[in-house]
Image: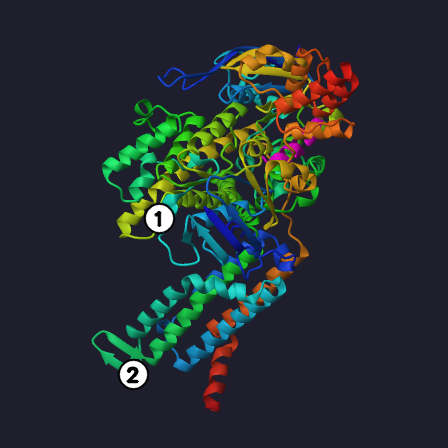
Amino acid sequence: MSIVVKDLTYIYSPGTPFERKALDGVTFTIEDGDFFGIVGRTGSGKSTLISHFNGLIKLMNGSLIVEGIDLSEKYDYKKLRSQVGMVFQYPEYQLFDETVEKDVGFGPKNLGLSAAEIAERAKNAIELVGLDYREIKDRSPFELSGGQMRRVALAGVLAMKPKTLILDEPTAGLDPKGKEEIMQLLLRIKRECPTIVMISHNMDEVSSYCNRIAVLGGGKLKGVFSPKELFDKEELVAEAGLSLPMPAYISKLLVERGLNVSASSEDELVQSILSIWGAKNA
Amino acid sequence: MRDVSFGQYYPSKSVVHRMDARIKIIISLCYIVLLILVPTIDRFLDKGRLGDYIVSVGATFIVIILFLLMVTLISKVPPLKVLKSVKSVIFLVIFTAVILVLFYGGTSNHIYFHKGIINISLEGIINSIAMAIRLFLLVMGPSLLTLTTTPVELTDGIESLLKPLKLIKVPVHEIALIMSIALRLIPNLIEEADKIRSAQKARCADFDSGNIFKRAKAMLPILVPLLISSFRRADELAYAMDSRCYRGAKGRTRMKIMRLGIRDLFGMLFFAAMFFVALMFIYDFFGVSTALANLAYSLI
Amino acid sequence: MSFIEFDNVSYSYSAGTKNEVKAVKNVSFSIEKGELVALVGHNGSGKSTIAKLMNGLLLPQSGLVKVNGLDTADKKNLFDIRKSVGIVFQNPDNQMVATIIEDDVAFGPENLGLDPKEIRERVDFALKSVGMYEYREDAPFRLSGGQKQRIAIAGVLAICPEAMVLDESTSMLDPTGKKEIMEVVTRLNREKGMTVIMITHFMEEAALCDKIIVMNDGSVALSGGRQTLYDDRLVELGLKLPMSCSVAKRLNKSGMNVGEVYTPEQLAEAICRSL
């Protein structure tokens, strides 16, 4: 089990007029090897939840075990943070060093590794995100394109060799082609870093990549579902501020018009429409 | 942090809140002047008795405190908020007070302890208490101003008051605009710094250990991205302002025009009355302070 | 004379240095009053540069940009051009100048030198048009991205421009925010006849527009009516079709004729019709 969350509650600015319950008794488990999605509206508590996973927010109430480390006790935060990588929204805005190689090596350096090990890890991470190590390592991260910068930022986290990778909207602000590339990249990363947790607002992404999806609303867990289960719960999807993935939405429109279609991908959709059409014409 | 709006403005619809910011700024300035006029014990003892000093300064403080209390009550700001404003200076004040007690060098007739340059006397103690009260009042008054006036009103007020400086080519409008945009961007910057800090912490960055140089160096991974993003923001903001027809102060009008109202007149009169009474005690107009002191002496 | 005309326009960043980036190359197109136009393309295809060229924030290094017949390169015209073409940018946080919503919306009309009463009327009108009137005295921090972006739209509306350019204004928003903005914008176009130029990489948004201009590597690759979405070259450029269009296209190819549709609803109707 990668992450075990039990009865997690978190209150911002307790005891002041600004007091706000961000998380309210959240309980669920993320298994090793999951591609786990977290969805919910802005302000539903998603970011507060994932910030707990690597100890950026101190546990207030409840219990949390991450990669075997119990966060309700005293723990080695370096060990935790090297096992659980965290990629924030627009991570390219956190690049700072003179060269790509140095920036990617920042994490390993903080872990106190040897220079050789740091260089090795930086190289592997840069190659893992699909960049040309030799060509890019000595360039300034600030002269790269937006897509490249995001990859470098991702490499900076992967260089810590985490077992679980947590991403907050990894494809935000990218064009459809860029989004697709990043999602494909995550699948490749998953071979080395088996557990991936991702916040997303993009239903098509969540439904085609995640095996399990947690829905948050007003700080409460509304449930953990498989994509198929979730899209049958239309109200829940709407409540989470999401729209159905396109294939499911078009299927729904067809069902309302009396056709028996249930598709979770474009191919499935086209196939089932054509088979209905074929049957009528036969 | 990002949940709390910037500054310490405490929203309410009280008369004090609705007063013209310019009047409030002028009153605050006069208030500061008044506190400066409160004499130190040295200046006083040359011509008067210690008791006269205590009565004169004590009465002045009481008048000022009553004034602050009334303004606080009228403004509906929780009194605790006003008191809390001294939190940031409390150590400075205590430190200064202790120094003043230990090294008081003025006229002193009641010495408790004397060795080398250390000289503890009744006059020194009274002097340092008076100084402490004065400093606290000096912080509390202006903090009432910021508690009851939004940063925008403040900048607009300052712009309006500084208008005469335009004659000597001071870019008053631009300065005010810079201030108001800075106020606008501070919460964004705080939020951003917070985010970057978390991101670097997630890569095991350590900001809290080592000596001061090490710590300063450890801040680079926050400062560099923050600086870069500030430039980006500034750039985008400049485009947005240009696009919205901004041409500087030339030909620009305002939606909200500051107009003095009856409440501003009352506010001024109320302050003027307090100001006069306080001055009366300080400068012994009509011999009030002396009379009070004589009364106190006769009672003792 | 068209409302906005681009005539053989080129623009490079850091022109004349070794870092020169040719963002826009010999681009020509025109936009008429009242049109709802989508300008689409990948990131880096030159879309945002075109937005800034439209009201003289950037000036063409060769070629001409004209708004209402006025050349943007002539400094005298800039104020009038910006009065008629407003831009809503990508990041809602970076286009607000004031800490109170109504003060921010007032910034534009204040720059026009209007009388306080008129400014107040315009601010109220603009905030009502985007459904944010009841928030007018609040600070923007607590608003959602979609709400902040509606404030930015109000800020442009208060100038009463003839055209509004939305430069990827929905790209940082969640689905709810995106929907809010699209609703406001299409309504402004339909009800008030405002010319709207949507710069976007979401083809679903382009499918709601009357006219589509496709940018690729700094040049106009394709342009035309909505049926441009059915042009095979679009796929060759690596752009992702709205799913309604790509499904319709595949059904048409298989012999089931559903025609050219642009929204999921139209697709569903067309499928039922052809069964």
The total of numbered circles placed on residues is 2
Quadrant for the C terminus of chain C in the image: top right
Residue extending furthest left? B116
**Can I make out residue C156 in this image?**
yes
Residue B295, placed above or below residue C191 = below
Q: Is residue A155 left or right of residue B103?
A: right
Q: Which mark is residue A79?
A: 1
Q: Any magenta on residue C12?
A: no
Q: Main secondary structure of the magenta part?
A: helix
The segment highlighted magenta reads C172-186
The subunit carrying tag 2 is B
Mark 1, Cα crowd under 10 Å, few <14 / some 14-19 / many 20+, is some
Under circle 1, the secondary element is helix
The subunit carrying tag 1 is A
Residue B165, horizontal then vertical, whole percent: 49, 43
Q: Considering depth in this image, is B53 or A189 the residue closer to the camera? A: A189
Under circle 2, the secondary element is strand
Question: In 3D space, how far apart are the residues under numbered discs 1 and 2 (Cα atoms)?
Answer: 60 Å
Mark 2, Cα crowd under 10 Å, few <14 / some 14-19 / many 20+, is few
* Occupied quadrant, residue A133: top left
Q: Considering depth in this image, is C235 or C190 the residue closer to the camera? A: C235
